[in-house]
Image (cartoon, rainbow, N blue to C red):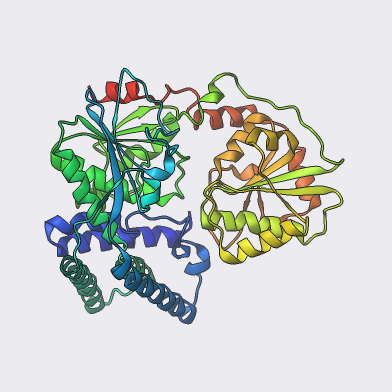
């Protein structure tokens, strides 16, 4: 990982610790849910070389744009925000509370999720939440924030940030990394993104006292709302548990809290289910009081049946098909789209088919959205709506940046290639031996990667890291962990 990113991580951690000390104890949990703590390079360019290399004028412009845009969002939210909606599903014999957003459920009245296998013998209570009333049938609206409380909390957070800036300026420590960290926090503050977090904390507390739960379960690992759950769990003396749902690599910064943050009170889970020993070894130094157990998510358990699930390859119009896969992360997907555009401009349509497979929850940049639609309308690229295995049947090569589909393609027998460029973080999920810089993409480079021999050792490692050798994540596994 680039040195500039490491410095920014350290600066964010130090800022979080100082800000938490400046706030009343009942507000400190807000600091651990901000983007300066839940550090996500997938949605912010501040973590990438493209920003780190900027000179002072472009950097000041980036700061101004970020703060200005956040002010507009904040003013909108000030008048529009009325809380969020939730629904609680209670099973009389349950001692586990599963807290999850509606968008990872099947949307039925039971709100089942493909992140956990439920059983009648080990029922779980559910607290399902959404910002949309239409998504939660018979949902209740919740908010404890009136305008006076909003103003009071905002001024305290603003005073903490301003006080820290004044202190660092007096100490002559206004480095570019410090300014980046402060802008990341200030943008979140001005956008009033903490409204939901404050309400969510109070809702979890309300539900927590209504029943004698033995465990709180979140299925989105260390996302910002999960930290609220760990906060309430710690306060109630109840274990908080989570389970890995996506691939964990060092570039996903939000999984790796700094030691100073943990010591200052950053809430962490008591139990963490992960896919493999490799993932456990990577995380353990950052979670000193967490118990790690192994599991396999229901979304990957089909890989347990054999070493691989091969597909019979089919050829489309005597052309080779290059499958580009995204993962609903704006910035890594922009690298994939850059690779697609690079090949599109080389006029290869007579020899290859360029097919784009978008994630079901894809969020493209507006400019990317426009050119992708235009290219598809002109039949220069295909946008797949096929089942994944059907895409694999026709693919001669799968191309991605940090999507789990790359793992699955390799295990299915499809050659794979990772792509990267100089502007954004290079994800280590895909080994260097099968990655290519976007500048080097050409028909010959595609042919070279298509002809690479299968690596059985790499396939086994991939299989381990999606949990294929670990027990299924079931409600029983959760109950056994909290006994």
Please count the marks in the image. Answer: 0
| The image quarter in which residue 234 lies | top left
Asked if residue 337 lies left or right of residue 3, the reply is right
Residue ID at (34%, 19%): 120
Residue 248: x and y, percent? 45, 41
Can residue 263 be seen here? The reply is: no
On the image, which quarter does residue 379 sit in? bottom right
Image location of residue 44, percent across then percent down: 45, 62
Give the answer, above or below, for where 66 lies relative to 143. Answer: below
Q: In the picture shown, does residue 167 fall above or below 145?
A: below
Front residue of 241 and 6: 241
Q: Image point 17% across, 45% down: which residue?
A: 205
Q: In the rendered view, would you say 189 is above or below 438?
A: below
Residue 40 visible in rendering: yes
In the rendered image, residue 70, in percent from the top left (x then y), is placed at 37, 71
Of residue 417 and residue 483, the one placed in the foreground of this image is 483
Q: Quadrant of the C terminus?
A: top left
Left or right: where does residue 249 sit relative to residue 32? right
């Amino acid at each position: 990982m680039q040195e500039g990113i490491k410095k920014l991580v350290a600066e964010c951690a130090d800022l979080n610790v100082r800000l938490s000390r400046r706030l009343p104890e009942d507000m400190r949990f807000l600091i651990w849910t901000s983007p300066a703590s839940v550090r996500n390079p997938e949605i912010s360019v501040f973590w990438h070389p493209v920003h780190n290399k900027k000179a002072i004028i472009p950097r000041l412009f980036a700061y101004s744009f970020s703060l200005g845009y956040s002010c507009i969002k904040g003013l909108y939210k000030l008048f529009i925000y009325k809380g969020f909606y939730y629904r609680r599903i209670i099973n009389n014999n349950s001692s586990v509370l599963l807290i999850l957003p509606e968008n990872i459920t099947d949307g039925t009245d039971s709100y089942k999720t493909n992140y956990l296998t439920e059983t009648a013998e080990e029922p779980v209570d559910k607290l399902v939440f959404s910002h949309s009333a239409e998504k939660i049938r018979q949902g209740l609206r919740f908010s404890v924030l009136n305008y006076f409380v909003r103003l009071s909390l905002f001024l305290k957070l603003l005073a903490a940030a301003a006080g820290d800036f004044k202190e660092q300026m007096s100490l002559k420590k206004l480095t570019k990394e410090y300014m980046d960290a402060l802008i990341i926090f200030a943008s979140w503050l001005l956008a009033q993104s903490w409204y939901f977090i404050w309400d969510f904390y109070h809702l979890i507390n309300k539900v927590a006292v209504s029943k004698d739960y033995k465990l709180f379960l979140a299925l989105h690992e260390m996302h910002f709302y999960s930290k609220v759950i760990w906060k309430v769990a710690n306060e109630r003396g109840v274990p908080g548990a989570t389970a890995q749902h996506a691939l964990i690599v060092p570039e996903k910064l939000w999984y790796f809290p700094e030691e100073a943050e943990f010591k200052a009170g950053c809430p962490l889970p008591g139990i963490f289910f992960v896919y493999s020993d490799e993932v456990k070894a990577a995380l353990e130094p950052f979670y000193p009081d967490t118990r790690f157990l192994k599991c396999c998510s229901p979304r990957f358990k089909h890989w347990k049946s054999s070493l691989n699930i091969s597909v019979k390859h089919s050829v489309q119009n005597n052309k080779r098909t290059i499958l580009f896969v995204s993962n609903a992360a704006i910035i890594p997907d922009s690298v994939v789209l850059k690779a697609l555009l690079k090949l599109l401009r080389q006029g290869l349509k007579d020899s290859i088919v360029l097919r784009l497979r978008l994630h079901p929850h894809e969020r493209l940049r507006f400019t990317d959205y426009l050119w992708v639609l235009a290219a598809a309308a002109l039949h220069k690229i295909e946008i797949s709506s096929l089942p994944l295995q059907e895409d694999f049947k026709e693919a001669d090569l799968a191309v991605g940046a940090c999507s789990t589909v790359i793992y699955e393609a390799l295990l299915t027998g499809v050659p794979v290639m990772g792509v990267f460029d100089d502007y954004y973080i290079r994800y280590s999920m895909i080994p260097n031996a099968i990655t290519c810089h976007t500048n080097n993409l050409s028909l010959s480079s595609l042919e070279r990667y298509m002809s690479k021999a299968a690596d059985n050792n790499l396939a086994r490692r991939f299989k381990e890291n999606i949990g294929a050798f670990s027990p299924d994540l079931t409600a029983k596994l959760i109950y056994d962990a909290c006994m």
